[in-house]
Image (cartoon, rainbow, N blue to C red):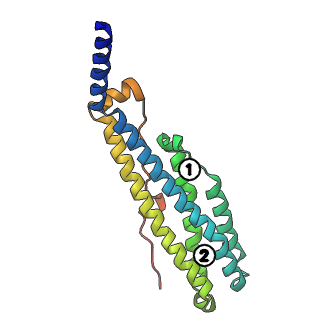
Amino acid sequence: MKSGKFFSAMVLAVAMTFTGCGYNTMQQQEEKVFKAWGDVEATLQRRADLIPNLVETVKGYASHERQTLEAVVNARAKATSVKLSADDLSDAAALQRLQQSQGELSSALSRLLVVVEQYPDLKANENFKDLQNQLEGTENRINVARQRYNEAAEEFNSSIRSFPNSLTNSLLLHLKRKEYIKADEAAKAAPKVKF
């Protein structure tokens, strides 16, 4: 009888210890990181889904701009082929590959929009205007999703490095730090405007 009470007391003591050690909190924060990453992936997919429609619309007006259109199509194909799972969020090189492919796609889209400036009829086309607005909205969503991911990663990374969570993590969970999404290298240089 005494051993049953002792065992119950030990279970209660262990449970109380774990409520203050961050065991559950760290796992909840890691799930927030995974959810935020899912949001980033969803917005990147939305952009990839819009691009074929944008390219087809521009193609009708600017058929001789084949090189620019092909660059967009190729950049989209490369960007959608680079996959990053939630398990890879601790791998800086994998995240860098994804960011590079997405940066190349952004660059190709920028060149396409410069080409569009040469076609006043295209700029006035309602389908194109709608696609362009959707693409601009998507770019904003991508930026917000990236910021939210970085916030979730910061909270998680701080949590696994703070005591007593760091002790719990090193003994029980072995969770790894999540990498941040960083700015594209090309974004560091200010764009040059020439008239």
| Quadrant housing residue 115 | bottom right
Of helix, strand and loop, which one carries label 1? helix
Q: Which residue is mark 2?
A: 112
Q: Quadrant of the N terminus?
A: top left
Tell which circle, 1 or 2, labels the residue nearer the N-terminal end.
1
**Residue 89: x, y in percent?**
49, 44
Q: Residue furthest front?
A: 1
Between 35 and 119, the one lying in front of the other is: 35
Compared to residue 92, the image places residue 171 above or below, namely above
**Residue 187: x, y in percent?**
45, 63
Q: Residues within 10 Å of mark 2 (few under 14, many from 20)?
A: many
Compared to residue 54, the image places residue 101 above or below, namely above
Q: Which residue is mark 1?
A: 97
Amino acid carrying mark 2 in the image? Leu
| Quadrant housing residue 172 | top left
Between 177 and 66, the one lying in front of the other is: 177
**Residue 33: x, y in percent?**
43, 47
Number of numbered discs visible in the structure rendering: 2
Q: Residue furthest top?
A: 2
**Residue 88: x, y in percent?**
53, 42
Q: Is residue 69 left or right of residue 29?
A: right
Q: Which mark is residue 40?
A: none
For the question of whether residue 92 can be seen, the reply is: yes
Of helix, strand and loop, which one carries label 2? helix
For the question of whether residue 179 can be seen, the reply is: no
Q: Is residue 5 left or right of residue 38?
A: left
Amino acid carrying mark 1 in the image? Arg
Label 2 near label 1: C-beta < 8 Å?
no
